[in-house]
Image (spheres, grey):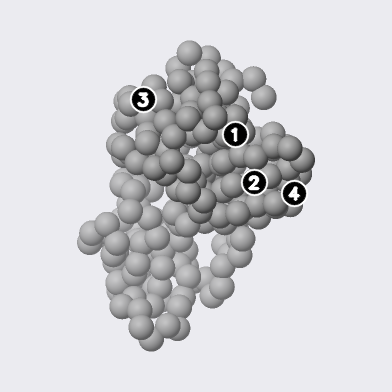
Amino acid sequence: MRYGNVVEGLFERRINRFIAEVFIGGANEKVHIKNTGRLKEILQPGVEVLLEYSNNSQRKTRFSLIAAKKNGAWINIDSQAPNKVAYESLKEGKISELGTVDSIQREVTYGDSRFDLYFEKEREKGFIEVKGVTLEHNGIAMFPDAPTTRGTKHVLELIKAAQDGYAAGILFILQMNGCFVFTPHKKMDEEFTNALIKASREGVNIIAYDCIVKTDELFLNQPVPVKLPEGTIDR
């Protein structure tokens, strides 16, 4: 996926979940944060950031914060980006675990959840839930960075879908490059971790891919091994 008019800035402070102050061209500007997660390890005072400019006169802010630099590399923090990348990649057959699909739809309801992607290929029908990953420590990518009851609910619904005969998968999109493994963040959310372990036992495909992050672009790169607390899922 590509962004439009992108500029660089220096992060100053986060005012609330949605708004931050950033220096752009030497001027202090209030900007929209395209991610309501904590992002404490990324959004530090003085860090370099990327912002997308909008000329929409109805907006309260002119810029949206989409990426930040950590250890010399960009991390995309746009929470809407993973779904777009996943849709484009699945449509183009770039996710090897899923292969080439015949049709794909976004935001399809099943049970009490609305999954990000629904696909059909040959005689197979399936659901994919996409999770964006921005938390990294020493090359280990982790999710979530805050407790997520909604995320746990999605995983449990995917288990039901798998039991009903659908193909089911959780696709973790690492919004960065350079991580050597993905693992659920058990210390942050043990319920989500346990749900993911149960899902893997019930036939839900747990997949992780990293991304190439450029100043105006984000695209799928390559698979990253998934390690659950009980071991590594074979690819």
For disc 3, the neighbor class at 10 Å (few under 14, some 14 to 19, many from 20) is: some
Give x and y (percent) for residue 85: 60, 53
Q: Is residue 99 visible?
A: no
Q: Secondary structure at mark 1?
A: loop
For disc 2, the neighbor class at 10 Å (few under 14, some 14 to 19, many from 20) is: many
Q: Earlier in the sequence, mark 1 or mark 3?
A: 1
Q: Residue at x 56, y 73 (%)?
A: 4
Give x and y (percent) for residue 149: 31, 37
- Circle 4 is placed at which residue position? 102
- Cα gap from disc 1 to disc 4, whole angstroms: 15 Å
- Circle 1 is placed at which residue position? 166
- Cα gap from disc 1 to disc 3, whole angstroms: 27 Å
Residue situated furthest bottom in the rendering: 57
Residue situated furthest left in the rendering: 15
- Circle 2 is placed at which residue position? 119
Which numbered marker is on residue 186? Answer: 3
Tag nearer the camera, 4 or 3: 4
Q: Are marks 2 and 1 in contact (CB under 8 Å)?
A: no
Q: Residue at x 36, y 83 (%)?
A: 58
Give x and y (percent) for residue 176: 54, 45
Tag nearer the camera, 2 or 1: 1
Q: Type of residue at label 3?
A: Lys
Q: Type of residue at label 1?
A: Tyr
Which numbered marker is on residue 118? Answer: none
Q: Type of residue at label 4?
A: Asp
Q: Are marks 3 and 2 in contact (CB under 8 Å)?
A: no
Q: Secondary structure at mark 2?
A: strand
Q: Secondary structure at mark 4?
A: loop
Q: Earlier in the sequence, mark 4 or mark 3?
A: 4
Q: Residue at x 38, y 55 (%)?
A: 35
